[in-house]
Image (spheres, rainbow, N blue to C red):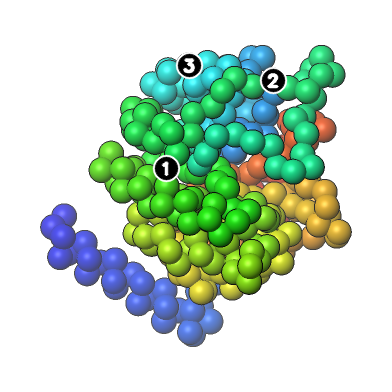
Amino acid sequence: MNYNRRKFLQSTGTLILGGMALSGKASSFLSNMAPHPVGLQLFTFFGIIDEDVKGTLTKIASVGYKEMESAFSKKGGYYGMKPAGFKAMVNDLGMSWKSHHVLGAPFKLPKGYKMPLGADGKPMVIPPMMNLRDNMQQLVDEAAEGGVQYLVCANAPTSTLEEIKSSIEILNKTGEAAKKAGLHFAYHNHDMEFKAIDGKVPYHLLLTETDAQNVKMELDLAWAVKGGQDPVKLFKDHPGRFPLWHVKDLDATHTNILPVGSGTIDFKRIFANSASSGMQHFFVEHDNPKDAFASIKSSYGYISGTLKA
């Protein structure tokens, strides 16, 4: 298909959906679309998956998850494997590896945080991890080797304006490098980016001072809500900027993370506005759950059943 024809069809589709939204028909149109593949962020199994990578992935696949987003591992690399080997394992189980998380700067526990306990009851010990500040090109090249669509910065220093400025520079450089390698690049938030520093909100600076074409956002819905944000308003203020989502729930006090659908976040409203966000993939995540498999089963049941996403 030539470029002009493709652009015409894309524009026509946008106009049709826009007109349907104005006429109140968009929701019924979207409700008749095929459900989106449900993805999982493997940080949910941090400290567990390294004990039996294939066995863990097999159980995840049996729940119904079809898309994977990987994170750092106690074994280093890609759960002790090279990118191509990890991709082959995921594909052999009927799933697709879509995205990979990396650090923006050398790892440092946030103030007040402690490493989770391992199976032996002791704080987990993880090997030195590469980061975009010091190892950008290698991380980009490895992601490209693995054939993922997205490389995601899991976090970056934002506690001072100087740190924010440095992080923005790193994100822009990585966005350029990722584009050259045929990848998309995105930034993943926590709630700290929504806390003003010297009168300026870090997340707003990240949105407005990074290249919108090269640096997209993976919006962690729960962390955004905990940070006092309305995800739908973010979508409307920055349409198309959020191709990736993290999906987890919060209790009424926004203190405890819960399986999707068992807390207080209005996912029906958020998913109804997925088109304006530009969402392409979403990944269930539960940080340090008591029972990871029970959590992902509960989340999958709600998303595929009640939510019908």
The residue positioned 70% from the left and 42% from the top of the image is 110
Q: Residue furthest bottom?
A: 23
Q: Which mark is residue 186?
A: none
Mark 2 residue type: Val
Measuring from the top left, give residue 9's x and y in whole percent: 25, 67
Circle 1 sits on which residue? 150
| The quarter of the displayed image where residue 226 is located | bottom right
Circle 3 Cα neighbour tier, 10 Å, few/some/many (<14 / 14–19 / ≥20): some
Q: CA distance from mark 2 to mark 3?
A: 19 Å
The answer to which of marks 1 and 2 sits earlier in the sequence is 2
Is 134 positioned to the left or the right of 268 in the image? left
Horizontal and vertical percent for residue 153? 50, 44
Q: Quadrant of the N terminus?
A: bottom left
Tag of residue 81: 3
Q: Which residue is mark 2?
A: 125
Residue displayed at 41% across by 59% down: 210
> For this rendering, which residue is in front, 226 or 167?
167
The answer to whether residue 157 is above or below residue 200 is above
